[in-house]
Amino acid sequence: MARAVKKSSKKTPSGKGVKTSGAAVQTRIDQEARGVYERIQRRQKPQMKLPIRSLSNVRYRPTPGYFQLKGKNKIRTLTVGTVKTFAQTLKMLAMSKVLIGQGKHSTKREAYYQAYNWGEAAFAAQEESDTVMDDVEAMLGVNREKLHFRADEHGGEVAGELIVIDRDRRTRERIEIDCTRFGSGAYSVPTIVEDLQFRTKAKFILAVETKGMFERLVEEDFFGEWHCILVSMGGVPSRACRRFIRRLADERNIPVYVFTDGDPYGYFNIYRTLKVGSGNAAHLNEYFCVPQARFLGVTPDDIVKYELPTHPLKDVDIKRANDAMRNDPFIQHYKKWQSAIKKMLTMGVRVEQQALAKHGLEFVAKTYLPDKLKDKSAFLP
Amino acid sequence: MARAVKKSSKKTPSGKGVKTSGAAVQTRIDQEARGVYERIQRRQKPQMKLPIRSLSNVRYRPTPGYFQLKGKNKIRTLTVGTVKTFAQTLKMLAMSKVLIGQGKHSTKREAYYQAYNWGEAAFAAQEESDTVMDDVEAMLGVNREKLHFRADEHGGEVAGELIVIDRDRRTRERIEIDCTRFGSGAYSVPTIVEDLQFRTKAKFILAVETKGMFERLVEEDFFGEWHCILVSMGGVPSRACRRFIRRLADERNIPVYVFTDGDPYGYFNIYRTLKVGSGNAAHLNEYFCVPQARFLGVTPDDIVKYELPTHPLKDVDIKRANDAMRNDPFIQHYKKWQSAIKKMLTMGVRVEQQALAKHGLEFVAKTYLPDKLKDKSAFLP
């Protein structure tokens, strides 16, 4: 316990204006519980206030640079109908407080099974406990990871000019992880990155869609030549991966360039999610978006310039692109993205990042990326 | 070139009886090409011999311990109908020889795009080039990785008492990667593990199904207390992950214990695939299976003993279990597996590894696994 308090009292810098130590989260939990307790003491019905989580309650502005809640809330009052959820929410808050005190983390699934001992407040299925966890997260306005809950997901892989600073589980000794020293392998990002620290002189972070391209760039010694940090997102980046890039970029003030396939999935599901977040998790974008991200490629223009092999757009691609043009506040804000998407739709084709291999395996590292990095102002916003 | 030859002439120990250096693979490629060339010189139709890849051409014996081809072959002769595939196969062999010479690796997708420059022999889709690659692999009797082709897949994550020895891409300097020094993170296994070497005094390898459980065991300092190596397979283990465990277990003579959910997916898709391989890739099981693997849990008996929360078997679970009882040579060979599966079907339930959290987060590391490790003879074969 003493150890955990010591740990959480250490200043852990995180996203701008988001310095929430373990002790501060415990205090927030105490406040919520006290609010409920005091209303009961005053013989009033206890209640909890939660933000409404949907695209209709979201706005986009270039500053701060992510989807934000407009501020609509719902109030959950204790009634016969809500008594079980109410109890579960309070128990979940208590579980989080204990975890923070112990310096331990629980997966969402472990939380569900731990709740087997809650008697009548036990969950019927994990979906129920996940929903209550989302509520707690939104209610406290801190991300789940700070409540010491984590998902069972990949955090991405890292190689390049970066030292990650962590602690040994047993000795609490400081550990320095040198991401240039993994040969053909990589550093696997843990699901909780809140307490990691960083040392680096890297000039930029290059976040790539596929592990295949990541290993290509490692094999070509791209990070050694360009003094950068490579991150493999493995498709749509997980929360851990997005949070890792965000904290690293914020704290060391490093630009972030994104390199995906040239298709709606790469543009919206990967890049847009990384940069500004998503609608249904708007209460979290503050922590998980990377507003400083810029889109390097592959762009529709690249297809022409580099004579790249393409595939026809699928119906789902066309639908996704049209939806984004009509409904996505981020795309609507940027003329350059609208032009790029119109061009893609006119050409009727998509392109994979590995299509660059048509010109030889080393082409991406020796020609394409160096070309691009010469004129960063041409990156899409 | 000189560097690559030097590298490949270095003895790289691998699976038993499977010592195939880069130079040896190049020689095999030359032999195949010469066979074709000489038949043409003799004015005969050139041909290639390929093993038939299906369950009907497979047998299981406890020694060597993996599904083996029974030896049926098909002959592909050059005709008007096969001319394109024939040319593609020869070009693919040539690409592999160049890659080995350069010390580079190509993803399957990059290989497809590189073949854009083959004129009439270019592939219409990646499925075509993948099939030709499978043919080349089966024909030469070496795994794709030794031909310097790789998939775009996860290799699994590792933490524990292991030093992985690799080389720096730029300097070729020897790199030692200490897998006890990753804090809350892990070592991410690359897709090609053929040239890795290992140093360890670990008592066993514990291969776990989920990253969530892996992080639980890291957080509980399980590997420090039990002097073992933890591997997160992330579901069904990829080829890279299986090959990594196999090479490590063979070379350092370490037992392998497997810890998955207690359901047909965990028993067959994960454990059985890891241990003996699969039917449709029987020509590769020699390299990718881990015959020394034993199944630690979660077993149907554990559900009763530890009073674990369960879920009803789904229809797909029941079908998979019945299919295995009827058709799987591995299950048919082991009475203990048949009893376990019958017990599961009678109980009608499955169990997740994280269900152990019902007894507290640390239960798995402090009680369940230590209990199990006291009596390894009770592990399922």
Image (cartoon, coloured by chain):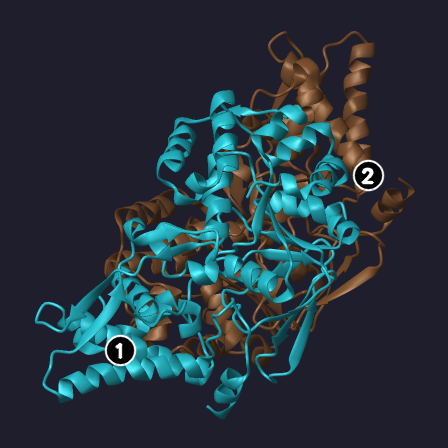
Chain colours: A cyan, B brown
The residue at 65%/12% (across/down) is B83
Question: Is residue A284 at all visible to an observer of this figure?
Answer: yes
Q: Which mark is residue B102?
A: 2
* Nearer to me, A317 or A104: A317
- Residue A216 position by quadrant: top right
Q: Which mark is residue A91?
A: 1
- In the rendering, at what x and y percent does residue A112 appear? 31, 68
What amino acid type is highlighted by mark number 1? Lys
* Chain ID at mark 2: B
The residue at 19%/87% (across/down) is A38
Image: A321 above or below B181: above
Left-right relation of A281 to A209 = left
| Image quadrant where one finds the C terminus of chain A | top right
Q: Which mark is residue B33?
A: none
Query: What secondary structure is found at the residue carrying circle 1?
Result: helix
What amino acid type is highlighted by mark number 2? Gln
The residue at 52%/71% (across/down) is A194
- Residue B148 position by quadrant: top right
- In the rendering, at what x and y percent does residue B58 appear? 52, 38
- In the rendering, at what x and y percent does residue A304 appear? 63, 24
Image: B58 above or below A62: above
Q: Give the CA separation, mark 2 to mark 1.
A: 60 Å
Q: Residue furthest bottom?
A: A2
- In the rendering, at what x and y percent does residue B85 appear? 63, 18
* Chain ID at mark 1: A
* Nearer to me, B65 or A350: A350
Query: What secondary structure is found at the residue carrying circle 2?
Result: helix
